[in-house]
Amino acid sequence: MAAASGRPGGDGLLHPGATVVHALPAEAKVVAALVLVVAVVATPREAVWAFAAHAAVLAAVAVRARLPLRLVLRRARVEVPFLAFAALLPVVGPAPRVELLGLDLSRDGLWAAWDVAATGTLGVVAAVVLSATTPVPELLRGLRRLWVPAVLVAIVGLMVRYLDVVVAEAGRMRVARLSRGDDPRWLGQARATAATAGTLFVRSYERGERVHLAMLARGGAGPAPSLPGPATSAGAWLGAAAVPAVAVLVAAAALVGR
């Protein structure tokens, strides 16, 4: 698994650095990201300037954290299915309709597509910045300091811990299919692709059962105890609050100006 991620324990998400963003406590960054996302969602879809301001704030944070643009774009590809869904909204949306580039599109559908694309992209980028600047153990410790239930934190920790294992297993299954003449680029192979996904789910479930039995055999009785750490200082909270504060002000100005 370490070979798959480059770092043991699921820290393949981390982009190492010695910036101010990396140094902020995990719990402060989690709260800041949540407040920023709420501010983005609360922004009226007609306020295009406000979404541009949100994007500028996130871009400034990514630059301050020295995150490569290629890394952010690569990880943001996870939202491609949602963007594909958003692209259908102008086509199937209700009247009134407008003509754009020779196509008869729904006006409300265009606004809905813009809203989904804008809010989704900003939310994904915020999550990318958070995961790229926070080690997984620190992130889990920060969630516990925010009084997130220990069971949920344990589930998230195990999911991240074994994500690389599942991805590697999927890669091996894909190689096995290709070696037997399968070509997943064609629609006729959709059945084989679905069968592969089902098999991967069963194998992942069985692996989870084995891991659970192994933990019980070693005396595990539930979530691991949280490790103590220094309390987050007021200065750290204020530093992390700068970005969501700007986002909240922008969203409030957009709401007032509707």
Image (spheres, helix red, strand yellow):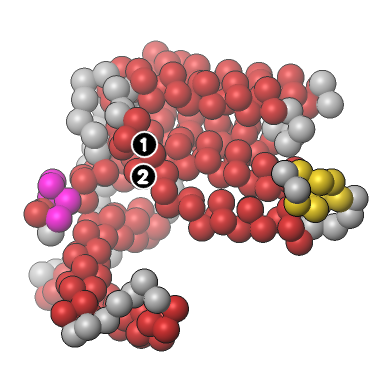
Q: Secondary structure at mark 1?
A: helix
Badge 1 density bin: few <14, some 14–19, many ≥20, Cα 10 Å: some
The residue lying at 90 percent from left, 50 percent from top is: 96
Seen from the viewer's position, the closer of residues 72 and 157 is: 72
Name which residue type carries label 2.
Arg
Question: What is the x, y in percent for residue 128?
Answer: 39, 39
Whether residue 141 is situated above or below residue 244 in the rendered picture: below
Q: Which quadrant holds the N terminus?
A: bottom left
The residue lying at 27 percent from left, 19 percent from top is: 19
Name which residue type carries label 1.
Val
Q: Does the stretch in magenta take in 247?
A: no
Q: Is residue 158 left or right of residue 59?
A: left
Q: Is residue 105 left or right of residue 18?
A: right
Q: Secondary structure at mark 2?
A: helix
Q: Which residues are magenta?
A: 4-8
The disc label shown at residue 75, or none: 2
Q: Which residue is mark 1?
A: 72
